[in-house]
Image (tube, coloured by chain):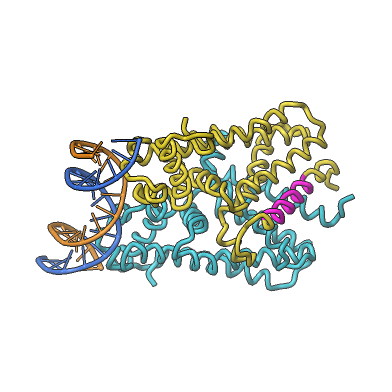
Chain colours: A cyan, B yellow, C blue, D orange
Amino acid sequence: MSQPGQIYQSPAEQTRAALLRAGLRLFGRKGYEGTSTREIAALARANIGSIAYHFGGKEGLHLACADFIVETIQSIARPALAEVAAVATPEDAAAGLKRSVERIVGFFVASPEVGDFAQFILRELSVPGPAFERIYSGAIQPTHARLCHIWEQATGEPAESEATRIRMFMMIGQVVYFRIAREAVLRRMEWTDIGLDEARIIADIAVGNLDALLTQRKEPPR
Amino acid sequence: MSQPGQIYQSPAEQTRAALLRAGLRLFGRKGYEGTSTREIAALARANIGSIAYHFGGKEGLHLACADFIVETIQSIARPALAEVAAVATPEDAAAGLKRSVERIVGFFVASPEVGDFAQFILRELSVPGPAFERIYSGAIQPTHARLCHIWEQATGEPAESEATRIRMFMMIGQVVYFRIAREAVLRRMEWTDIGLDEARIIADIAVGNLDALLTQRKEPPR
DNA sequence: GTCTATAAACAGATAGAC
DNA sequence: GTCTATCTGTTTATAGAC
């Protein structure tokens, strides 16, 4: 497979990779229908025909973008998965949850490079198309299941209970929303960008919320 | 103004209203670029030319949809706003927050009619276009500011502090995510739909999260 | 006001020269 | 592999009959 980030790339691989990056960015920003193959080719400094040559067509490029994201995420997530396999104390698990929240903030909210990944995923999430299946089973389902598992280690509540699964969706959603509603957040917060500083603030509050949930479980409500 | 829900509608008003409803639904589900004027006219059982006649064109219809949503929300929210104006005890404010969470779940998550509104808003939120300004200043900003205000009444923390504003975005986000990631939620939860029953479950857990935040503030962390 | 026909621009896909 | 030219279909907008 020819992808960005390799040591050496043949000219063909460079074109392929440039198309992939351009597709990732434009599909993420403007949606599948909102993006024309001509735009993609222009951004990649390639000709229109190259999309058909390398990917078979627009839909093929779109699917290749999804695959690229899933592979990238899996290569990053592999060490994190190993970490989970080991049985942990509730305290370690709680710390693991907090780290997970921080990672999610880093991935979805902070604006640099990866922002394109996040937007592509969110778009395919809200408008499921042919690429949804790969995104879901390759990235969303494993990540969510892992969070549920750590939650069980931290609280004793069963990982696959209805409440746990919903709660983990909420934990993700409260953070991801800052990317989805980015423009509204910028106005309301009077920020000009959501960069590392802003991500830090968001992560701290999200971790604080998590803390409230965890202590609520340690000290039963009166 | 000619809108659905009136007592009598002239034929022209009926056409206009039908186009508005069709636009709302299709723009919400498939996005602006993903929707053709032909589809809209077909769903509204009107001819293509009527869009230009009544709204000046596709973009005009899109803006009219945004205006319609804002007006509808404002007419619903007016009583809620009056309710807030009165000074409340922390307990009343806390109850008001919980009711707000339940309303947000009802509006964004439960699938019937209003679902089109929610999706239209979320789409304009994540891909800001010409209609964003109206949605933001007409619906998002006032709602968010109101929540911040109630939060102050409930906790004593300043409504317009950075932390409060972020926290209220998170309160909304954790719920709204169930609409955005609807397809992923359906699979992971093994639900076939997110209807009233599922909305009830989601609302209860979201209110529980809120409770954890509020008690965390009453009983300072040890 | 409604409807049809059509114009003008644009889409994605493809054939063939290099 | 790359690039250009072109085909075919679809888009929105519009002109004009009714």
Relative to residue A79, is residue B42 depicted above or below?
above
In x, y percent, where is residue C1?
35, 35
Residue A215 image offset from top left, x and y in percent: 81, 53
| Residue B135 part of the magenta segment | no
Residue closest to the eye, B143 or B77: B77
The answer to whether one can see residue A110 in this image is no
* Among the 4 quarters of the image, the one containing residue A46: bottom left
Relative to B103, A26 lies left or right:
left
Residue at image point 64% right, 57% down: A169
Along the viewing direction, whichever of A72 and B152 lies nearer the viewer: B152
Give the answer, above or below, for where B92 lies relative to A6: above
User: Residue B131 location, x and y as percent?
Assistant: 45, 37
Q: Residue at x 86, y 48 (%)?
A: B222
Residue B207 spot, x, y in % from top left: 74, 48
Q: Number of numbered discs present?
A: 0
Part of the protein shown in magenta: B199-213
Of A213 and A79, the residue lying toward us? A213
In the figure, B112 relative to A58: above or below? above
From where the camera sits, is residue A97 visible?
yes
Q: Above or below — where is B207 with respect to B8?
A: below
Given residues B48 and D4, the one toward you in this image is B48
Rendered residue at 36%/41% (across/down): B58
Q: Main secondary structure of the magenta part?
A: helix
Left or right of A174? Residue B7 is left
A61 left or right of B145 in image: left
Residue pushed farthest top?
B86
On whether residue B207 falls in the magenta region, the answer is yes
